Image (cartoon, rainbow, N blue to C red):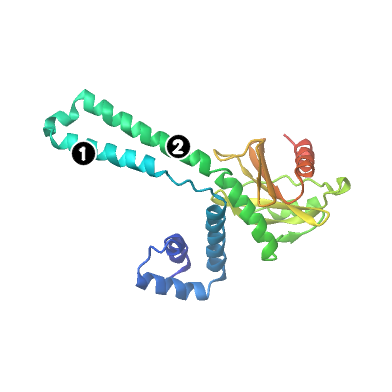
Amino acid sequence: MNHDEAAQLLGPYQDGELDLTACVKLEEHLAGCLSCQQKLAGEQELTDLIRSETPHFKASPFLKTRIQATLRKEKSSSATIPWWKHFSPTWMFSGLAGAAAVLVILAVGIFWTQRIPLLAQEAVVNHVRSLQVSHLVDVASTDQHTVKPWFAGKLDYSPQVVDLGPSGYPLIGGRLDVLDHRDVTAIVYQRRKHYINLFIWPRNADSLDGRFYSQNGYHVLGWTKSGMNYLVVSEVGEKELREFVKMIQDQTID
């Protein structure tokens, strides 16, 4: 099994969807591929984080009973209607109304369970991983003119790198990371004993315009400017993080 084949099977492997033969071949590849091991570990961290942080709401017995009774009634009624009458306007309207009700229930469930967007969750996982596996930066430097050129040729865009050292947020360096299913820039700053990961990538549909989120002591704030997405993650307090963001925004060229 080559690397590309293994990468495509990591998700099904994690979900227990592979047969025994595929599992054995993939595990043989994993034993000698550090890249796939890290990717699998990252996906598992994200899955565990989502499961631990997502609230679960159990339907009451009364609601279950009502749904089951309605389904039985619909089934019973349908059994006595000739097949050609199933397409009458009244039946179709009833079916659409039922489908709409189901969609409303699903939408409400999604609203209540997704307290923090997946994009923000993924950013938190990346931040934590960068601290745990000692891979905070690929290029270590406090000089923005050293960090910015390092990304040349590695990405299809050129990130702006701001120096906030005089303001108490010294630049540590930068690295390549993966966020929102694409390679992104991660610029790393420090605030006393805490690190700040600033992710930058071209703007698309997924962005966190000005919204602030907190999870397990980590804070996330995202915005867009000049066709780019910016997303910052850190353990520093909300006031300091907003101060940092304001300075980045003020010094980012339009």
Up-down relation of residue 186 to residue 226 (above or below): below
Q: Circle 1 sits in a helix, a strand or a loop, which is it?
A: helix
In which quadrant is the N terminus drawn?
bottom left
Question: Does residue 221 appear left or right of residue 172 in this picture?
Answer: left
Up-down relation of residue 88 to residue 135 (above or below): above
**Quick one: 167 or 175, which is closer to the camera?**
167
**Image spot of residue 195 (x, y percent):** 76, 54
**Image spot of residue 32 (x, y percent):** 52, 75
Query: On the image, numbered disc 2 is attached to which residue?
Result: 107
Residue 250, quarter of the rendered image: top right
Question: What mark, if any, has residue 75 been given in the picture?
Answer: 1
**Image spot of residue 254 (x, y percent):** 72, 34
Residue located 27% across and 26% down the image: 93
Quick check: can you spot residue 185?
yes
Residue 202, quarter of the rendered image: top right
Question: What mark, if any, has residue 111 been given in the picture?
Answer: none
Q: Nearer the viewer, mark 1 or mark 2?
A: 1
- Give the residue furthest to the right: 166
Question: Does residue 48 appear left or right of residue 82 in this picture?
Answer: right
- Give the residue furthest to the front: 62
* Of callouts 1 and 2, the N-terminal one: 1
Indicate the amino acid at tag 2.
Ala
